[in-house]
Amino acid sequence: MNGTSPSPGTKLPPKLTRPTLPPRKYWPWFVFILLVNYLLMSYLFPPGDAPVTVPYTVFREEAGKNNVSAIYSRGTTIEGRFRAPVTWPTPEDIKQAGPTSARSAIDRRLLPPARTSSHFETELPTFFDRDLEPFLIQHNVEISAVPIQQASAWATLLYGFGPAVLIIAFYVWMYRRAAAQGGMGGMGGVFGIGRSKARRYDTETADRITFNDVAGIDEAESELVEIVDFLKAPGKYTRLGGSAPKGVLLIGSPGTGKTLLAKAVAGEAGVPFFSMSAAEFVEMIVGVGAARVRDLFKQARESAPAIIFIDEIDAIGRARGGMMMGGGHSEQEQTLQQILTEMDGFSGREGIIVLAATNQPDVLDRALLRPGRFDRRVVVNLPDKVGREAIVRVHVRKVPLDPDVNLEELAQATPGFSGADLKNLVNEAALLAARRSEDAVHHKDFLDALEKIVLGPERPLLLGPEDRERIAYHESGHAVLGLLVPGADPVHRVSIVPRGQALGVTYQRPQTDRYNYPEAYLRARIIGMLGGRAAEEVVYGTRTTGAENDIEQATQLARNMVTRWGMSDAVGMVQLAPAHNPYLGGPSGYMGEKPFSEQTGNLIDAEVQRIINECHEEAKRLLREHRAALDALVAALLKQETVSEQEILQATGLPSAPLLEGRPVRG
Ligand code: ADP
Ligand code: ZN
């Protein structure tokens, strides 16, 4: 495996995408109903008041002691109340049924567990006791024809009608939900189904978020300063008849801080912030989304000036008429339409600004982007090295750091990390330091946390010596080529400790953030990727499945060279790849027909194969030539499992890879 340095697309692939959970709006209702049922039942039938079943003799005995207040008889069953609670069976009863004889053991097993209650039940013997009635009257027992326990009537009712009531309640509920679409707007449904569920953050509190908490995305930040100004003093802008901005679209990969920016704008301006994810608008029942939009804007208008933040607007703002799945179509359209209507509806004087976030700006409906709607676009990029350092500084404010921590080095080691990733890194490091009972977070904690995040946690996996050796050769193949091929990224660490999906890892990362990749660098990457398999072939002469991931990555890269970057003479400088979405990482796949002929398709395949084969041959040639270095690194790996950059250079006796020549060609 060799998958840890970012692949050279024009942008780095997104690291941690956060999946949205399916709507969980139904389970609170089930829990609620269950709870009501439970409370009701336990109120009507307190668990302690269940009747204790006593033998007839015990009943007569207690009646004789004037301890029975009332009875109710139903056939041969008598139910009643003792004046003072009675425990049955008594400890003596249990003792009497002592363990000595087989007979009594059976009796004992027949005795129920002892219980105490003033509510009892007993069976009349079939030889009916004729003296019972006068005996009871004599002992002041009230004989009643009404059940003693009123609750049992309730129980009958509940058992009989409960399910029906529940079903009716459910229908009423469904009806109210459906009614929400009928224009009842914010009031939709007694249970508030048509309400927006927006989260409101008030910004007067002490822990409000300001631009102080945002770092490393200065361009985006400065574009939003004007919005803050406007919210603070709307009059200043509209004085001369100009209309204020209404909508701003924040574009960027997940975790780059779009939500954070929106909150900071609200915090700086001191206005309330209403936040909702577009996915939450869309319900199964048509019309609910629109009702929620109405309610959201109503709430905001009531506390204007205010900010409305709609996350993942692409979930409803997708171009209409495009490919859409299932029946959500018209619901989506209605919800979108409602947002547009609301935005057209306010004049811009109310002081409401809608910020929306997306990572797929190109799928958005054009109607959303028209002037007067989301006409401002702010791109939130992944931070560069300086930005990453600044973001880490924001997040370590409350973390005690050991003086040995080098944040600049950390920033350098995290190309492609978003703000959210960096926050996570700081958190992991702090947890790790706490687990190690340190008083402050050390640099090593950061490095170990980084390794865990990038490579996955270690996986306990017992490998036989042959497998271990083979993996060591595979990884060493990657690493040695990382030292030999000019322009290759420096090799920082090689390990044969299984982690996540990988059996071993070669950790390479670029010296600086790269935005423009020379062809020779890309070839160096491919040669390095194929180095694992090449080493196995050179040493063992056989192949394993272990190179699947390497092959996939190398093929992708070679294909991009041919179809996107014009690096094949045979194909030429023609754009043959599907349109690229820079905020989603890799290419987005062909939609419908491929934009080239079958001949060209064959040519692309041939060129990709040519590049891969050339690189493969080069990898094998270099490894054969430096077999001694390869063997030495394998020996070090088998001994230590993980070797650092310094140890790699020492073991192989090779210098770091030479830099690429970049001087202009003259002549
Ligand atoms: P997005 O909305 O773009 O997906 P978020 O704003 O939700 O990303 O970011 C998640 C968290 O990551 C934030 O709450 C913040 O703590 C941290 N974060 C992201 N970007 C930055 C940044 N530029 N500066 C400081 N913290 C950041
Ligand atoms: Zn590999």
Image (cartoon, rainbow, N blue to C red):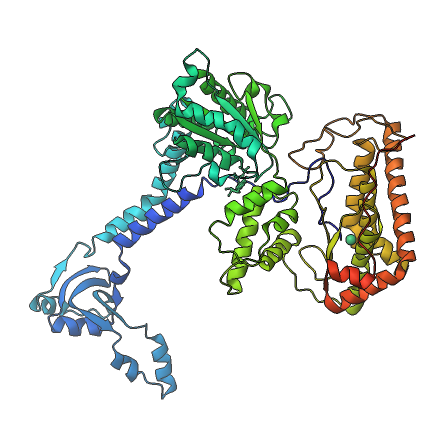
Q: Is residue 290 left or right of residue 160?
A: right
Q: Nearer the viewer, residue 664 or 17?
A: 664
For the C terminus, the image quarter is top right
Q: Is residue 321 left or right of residue 27?
A: right
Count of residue discs:
0
Place residue 207 in its image quadrant: top left
Q: Is residue 283 left or right of residue 5?
A: left
Q: Which of 67 and 399 is in front in this view?
A: 399
Q: Nearer the viewer, residue 343 or 176?
A: 343
* Residue 115 horizontal/vertical position (percent): 27, 70
Residue at far bottom of view: 100
Q: Is residue 90 above or below residue 424?
A: below
Which residue is painted at 46% across and 13% down in the image?
A: 242
Residue at far top of view: 241
Q: Is residue 600 left or right of residue 582?
A: right
Which residue is painted at 61% across and 48% down in the image?
A: 408
* Residue 26 horizontal/vertical position (percent): 45, 40
Regarding residue 258, the answer to whether it shows in the image is yes
Place residue 369 in its image quadrant: top right
Regarding residue 348, the answer to whether it shows in the image is no
Which residue is painted at 52% across and 56% down in the image?
A: 401
* Residue 375 horizontal/vertical position (percent): 55, 20
